[in-house]
Image (cartoon, rainbow, N blue to C red):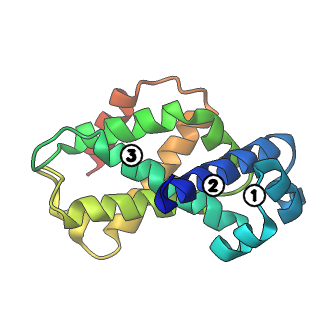
Amino acid sequence: MSPSELKQQNLTAIYQALLQLMSRKPLAAISITELCQQAHVSRSYFYRHYQNFDQIILAFQAQAILHYFRGLPTGSQVELTTLMTRYFELTKSAVVTYRLLIKNNKIDILLQTFQSAFQLLLKQDRIGVHSAKLTEPYYLEFFSGAVINMSISWVTHGLVESPTYLAQQVAKFV
């Protein structure tokens, strides 16, 4: 196994262990020792790669977004509605995790990963015809907050609407 594959395997193991523990108790009540035992990694591994639990969540969520990029239609640009539909599909597929993160007040991580991913797409000019507002100062923060808040509301109300419907609503706001 290559070093990058091993690193990915360990990240997945420690993230999954953290989610399992979070499903049983609040994040604040989880010890590093307990997490390392659950994930079958050493404490020295934890401290070499992470300073806190948020870094584990952030690293894994960033990889999930990268995986999401790979699922976008090929070509130079993607319509905003398509992009948002894929984002809401990703949210729906990871709803259990999303609920755990919301319950444990990790909304800032969801916001940070969405904002970074969207910013990268803007920088790479991957988003098709869109409002010039998206590139104005502070609009990205506003837009990201709106999308994440919609996601949270959608998740907490039982995923009633379809990802496509939510994406269409987002496109109307821009």
Q: How many neighbours does mark 1 have within 10 angstroms: few (below 14), some (14-19), or many (20 or more)?
A: some
Query: Which circle's residue, 2 or 1, is located before the other in the chain?
Result: 2
Q: Quadrant of residue 140?
A: bottom left
Which marked residue is nearer to the observer: mark 1 or mark 3? 1
Describe the element under mark 1 as helix, strand or loop. Answer: loop
Which residue is found at the position 69% from the left and 53% from the top?
Answer: 14
Describe the element under mark 2 as helix, strand or loop. Answer: helix
Which residue is found at the position 16% from the left and 63% from the top?
Answer: 132
Amino acid type at circle 1 is Val
Tag 2 near tag 1, CB within 8 Å: yes
**x then y, percent, for residue 170:** 33, 43
Q: Which residue is mark 1?
A: 41
Amino acid type at circle 2 is Asn
Q: Is residue 42 above or below residue 21?
A: below
Residue 142 in view? no
Tag 1 near tag 3, CB within 8 Å: no
Q: Is residue 10 left or right of residue 87?
A: right
Query: Which circle's residue, 2 or 3, is located before the other in the chain?
Result: 2
- Determine the CA span between mark 2 and mark 3: 17 Å
- Determine the CA span between mark 1 and mark 3: 24 Å
Q: Is residue 72 above or below residue 144?
A: above
Residue closer to the observer: 84 or 161: 84
**x then y, percent, for residue 41:** 75, 58
Q: Which residue is mark 2?
A: 10
- Determine the CA span between mark 2 and mark 1: 7 Å
Q: Is residue 42 left or right of residue 146?
A: right
Tally the numbered discs. 3
Residue closer to the observer: 89 or 71: 71
Which marked residue is nearer to the observer: mark 2 or mark 3? 2
Query: Which circle's residue, 1 or 3, is located before the other in the chain?
Result: 1
Describe the element under mark 3 as helix, strand or loop. Answer: helix
Q: Which mark is residue 67?
A: 3
